[in-house]
Amino acid sequence: MEVVDQLDSILFDDYIKRKTVAVSRFVTDGILYGGIDWAAAPRPTSVSPYMYEALLELVVVHAQISEIAPPLVSRALSALLINMAQDCLKCFQQVERFGMGGMLQGTLEMEFMNHTLSQYQSASSDEILQLIYSTIDRAYQSEGGENLQKEMGALKDVLSQARRTTQVQFMCFKKPK
């Protein structure tokens, strides 16, 4: 049985590594090279395209694994969520400064990812998410005169709208009732 377990581990790790590369490309390109000026970004009105692209890549993964080995879906997507969150953390650590709009946009992206993949969260992914929020918060420079409560309320509205408009696209990530 040990040989079978080793083979399973090798194949699983290789698959996760290959899929992580694809998702990482979307995340890195979006956060660091997507043209977002995090220090001067306006208040967000939608989730950035890179996040949709990364999550749609995970829809493909879900479909592939569901077809071949349904019991591995949760294990694979949990691992990919951790890797995706780590990539987001690494990228946000490279952003020198966030203005109000950039801070809200980064928070929106992470909340959208977190809500969409909530079924696959773990203690590890939650810890990384908290590190992301801390990273954004440390680099956030208040512009003065801002009403953070009001801004967060508006952000929740944008998040709700994004979740509503993508519920069919990401339906595969929902827990079956």
Image (tube, rainbow, N blue to C red):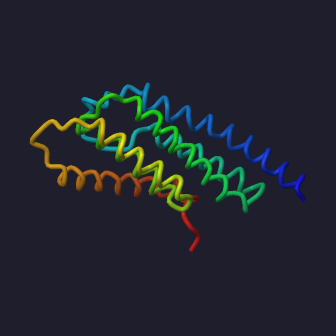
Expressed as whole percent of the image width and height from the top left, the position of residue 92 reads 41, 35
137, 147: nearer the viewer: 137
Residue depicted at 59% across the width and 43% down the height = 57
**How many discs mark residues in the rendered view?**
0
Expressed as whole percent of the image width and height from the top left, the position of residue 65 reads 72, 53
Q: Is residue 50 left or right of residue 23?
A: left
11, 71: nearer the viewer: 11
Q: Is residue 51 left or right of residue 59?
A: left
On-image quarter of the N terminus: bottom right
Q: Is residue 47 left or right of residue 57?
A: left
Expressed as whole percent of the image width and height from the top left, the position of residue 136 reads 34, 40
Determine whether 106 is above or below 8 in the image.
above
Residue 146, by quadrant, is top left
On-image quarter of the C terminus: bottom right
Residue depicted at 40% across the width and 58% down the height = 164
Expressed as whole percent of the image width and height from the top left, the position of residue 112 reads 42, 51
Residue depicted at 46% across the width and 39% down the height = 89
Residue at the left extreme?
A: 145
Q: Is residue 73 left or right of residue 122?
A: right
Residue 40, by quadrant, is top left
